[in-house]
Image (cartoon, grey):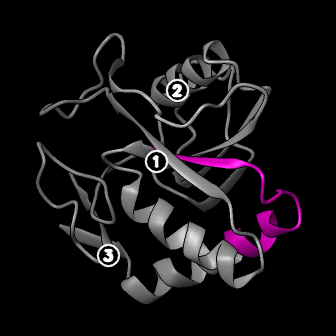
């Protein structure tokens, strides 16, 4: 495994993206983490936003796209929906990586169908490999290479999510 970003480099990038979005979001927004992968980034980001005076409400969607494979399934599946009402709200989708684009697009559609007025997205790692660019993140912390990433929430069959750094497995 090649380490691409260290723990301190990740922290710097989270701080940078929090600085960029803090002036553009409102405290009444609902931050929606995409589980399982987006949990680590979401926790760091909402703390960083709080340090900048923006305390958003929090919820989560659990969606699976990869399962235990290294290739995306044809269609993402919703495993657990948000529990907070989103009707009329602006949601901030938070995910760890934007690669095929299908998971984020699926989450966007799920929130709009639930009545969200608007959905914006932030991802930690953005690859230039999106299949469906109909919905793209407004913010990203890092432009990632087109490699299979692990660590900081990203996994291989459930392993490596807890690594404090981001590595590539080729």
**Secondary-structure class at tag 1:** strand
* Contact check, label 2 and label 1, Cβ < 8 Å: no
Q: Quadrant of the N terminus?
A: bottom left
66 w.r.t. 154: above or below: above
Nearer-N-terminus badge (2/1): 1
How many C-alpha atoms fall within 10 Å of the one at disc 3: few (<14), some, or many (≥20)? many
Q: Is residue 20 magenta?
A: yes
Nearer-N-terminus badge (3/1): 1
Q: Which residue does the numbered mark 2 point to in the structure image?
A: 107
Q: Residue at x 60, y 24 (%)?
A: 111
Instruction: Work out whether residue 126 can be spotted.
Output: no
Q: Which residue does the numbered mark 1 point to in the structure image?
A: 97
133 w.r.t. 169: above or below: above
Q: Which residue does the numbered mark 3 point to in the structure image?
A: 165
17 w.r.t. 68: above or below: below
Nearer-N-terminus badge (2/3): 2
Marks 3 and 1 sit apart, C-alpha to C-alpha, by 14 Å
Boundaries of the magenta span: 17-33
Q: Left or right: 161 with respect to 59?
A: left
Q: Residue at x 68, y 73 (%)?
A: 49
The image quadrant that residue 87 belongs to is top right
Marks 2 and 3 sit apart, C-alpha to C-alpha, by 26 Å
Q: Left or right: 158 with respect to 150?
A: left
Q: Residue at x 16, y 47 (%)?
A: 156
Name the one closer to the observer, 54 or 120: 54
Where does the image place residue 165, in percent across and percent down from the top left? 32, 75
Where does the image place residue 81, in percent across and percent down from the top left? 42, 27
């Amino acid at each position: 495994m090649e380490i691409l970003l260290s723990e301190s480099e990740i922290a710097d990038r989270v701080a940078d993206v929090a600085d960029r979005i803090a002036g553009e979001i409102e405290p009444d927004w609902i931050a929606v983490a995409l589980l399982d992968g987006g949990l680590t980034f979401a926790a760091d980001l909402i703390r960083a936003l709080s340090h900048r005076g923006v305390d958003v409400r929090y919820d989560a969607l659990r969606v699976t796209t990869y399962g235990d494979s290294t290739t995306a399934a044809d269609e993402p599946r919703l495993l657990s929906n948000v529990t907070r009402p989103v009707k009329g709200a602006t949601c901030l989708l938070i995910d760890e990586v934007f690669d095929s684009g299908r998971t984020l697009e699926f989450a966007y559609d799920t929130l709009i169908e639930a009545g969200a007025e608007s959905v914006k997205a932030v991802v930690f790692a953005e690859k230039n490999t999106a299949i469906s660019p109909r919905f793209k993140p407004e913010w990203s912390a890092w432009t990632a290479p087109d490699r299979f990433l692990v660590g900081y929430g990203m996994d291989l069959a459930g392993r490596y999510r807890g690594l404090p750094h981001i590595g590539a497995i080729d």
